[in-house]
Amino acid sequence: MRRHALEQFQLKSPAAISRFLNHYEWDLRAIIRAMRRHALEQFQLYRSRFTGRFPNIELIVDMTSLPKEGKFPLLGGWTHRFNGVTGVHLVVLYICCGEVRLPWSFLIWRGKHQTSPAELALKMLARLPVEFRKGRTALHVLADAGFSGRKFIAGVLDLGLTVSVSIQANKVMDTGLAIRQVRRQGQAIFLKDLPQIPLWLYWVWLPTKTGRGKEKRYVVSTVQWTPSTIRKKGRRRWRIEALFKTLKSRFGLHRFGQQTRRGVLRYFCLCLLSFLLCHFQDLEDVESGHRTSPWPDWGELAGRVRVQFCGLVRLAELEAEILSIRTVLEGVLRL
C-alpha cells in the first residue's frame, strides 16, 4: 500500500501498519487455513439450505496484473512485464456456485522460462478440497484464451474436470484448417496439437475494444452444449473480472507498497479476507431479504463488517484515550 494510502488508517499509524505487514511474527498460513475453513463452512451451509437442483460449481481461472514501478530487490523476481504492465502478476482461482463467490487461491507468476500461468492454474485446481466434489454437482472450469494451450486442456481432463475456454481464431485443427473456417456451431473438432481429445466449437459476438461494432470470439468445450448455454457460460466467466475490479477499487489490492515478499503476501491475503467477510455478510442479507438492490454495496458492507470485527479494538482505544484525558483533567483540578 502506498504511503498516502497508509495515512488514511484511523486505528493505527502508517508505521505500525507497515511493521505489522513486513516485520511482526504472525502465522500467515494459519490465517489462510482459517479463511478456507470458514469459506468451506459457508459453502456447505449454502448447499444444505438450497432447495431444488443444486447449481453447478464453476472454477474460473484468470490472471490479473498489479502495477508496481521502481526497483524492489527484496521481492526476488516477483515483478515482471506482462501485456504491457510492469508489476506483480497473479493467477487466481475463483469458485462460483449460485450466490456463493469464493476467491479460493492465487499464485504469483515468476516470469518467462518459469512455471507458466496455465501450469499455475492446474496446480491450484489439483489442490481443490474434496468437499467441493461431494454429491452429484458438476465442476466445470472456465478460462480465457491465455489458458487454451494443449497442456491446460489435457491437464484439466486428467483431474476429472470439464472445461470451456476461449481460443484464438487462427488455431489449427487436425484437418489443417483454422478455427475461423468452421461454419457450423457445436461441431466436434480435434486440434492439431491435441488430436486425441474431441472438443466442441462455438462462437459469440462481443463488442470490440474500441466499442465500435462487434467481433466473433471462439470457444471450445469438452462438453457438448447448446449455443445459448455456451453464451451463458461465457457471461459467467466475466465474474472473475468483476472480482478483480472490486478487489482493486474497493479493497485496494493494487495499492500495495510493501518491499518484502512477506509484506506483499500478507497484504494480498488481507485484501481477500476483507472481500470474503463482506461477501458472507452480503449472503446473510440476501437470505434475510435485507438487500434490495441487485448488486451489493461494498462500501456499506465494509462499514458494517468493520464495526462487527474491529469495533472492540476501536472501543479499547477510545477507553484508553478517555482514561488519559481524565488523568490530565484530575491533575489540572488538583492545582
Image (cartoon, rainbow, N blue to C red):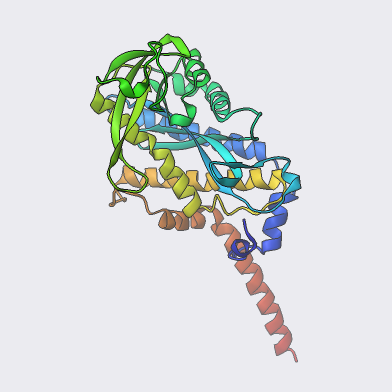
Q: Quadrant of residue 123?
A: top right
Q: Quadrant of residue 283?
A: top left
Q: Kindly give the residue lying farthest to the front in the view shown.
A: 176
**204 shown above or below 155:** below
Image location (x, y in percent) of residue 158? 50, 13
53 relative position to 276: left or right? left
Q: Nearer the viewer, residue 315 or 184?
A: 184
**332 shown above or below 35:** below
Q: How many numbered discs, if any?
A: 0
Q: Quadrant of the N terminus?
A: bottom right
Image location (x, y in percent) of residue 323? 66, 73
Q: Quadrant of the C terminus?
A: bottom right
Which residue is at a point 55% across and 45% down the rendered structure image?
84
Residue 241 seen in the figure: yes
291 relative position to 280: left or right? left
Image location (x, y in percent) of residue 303? 46, 58
Which residue is at a point 68% across and 52% down the rendered structure image?
258
**97 shown above or below 283:** above
Image location (x, y in percent) of residue 196? 44, 7
Q: Nearer the viewer, residue 322 or 161?
A: 161
Q: Nearer the viewer, residue 137 or 208?
A: 208
Q: Kindly give the residue lying farthest to the bottom in the view shown.
A: 335
Residue 280 seen in the figure: no
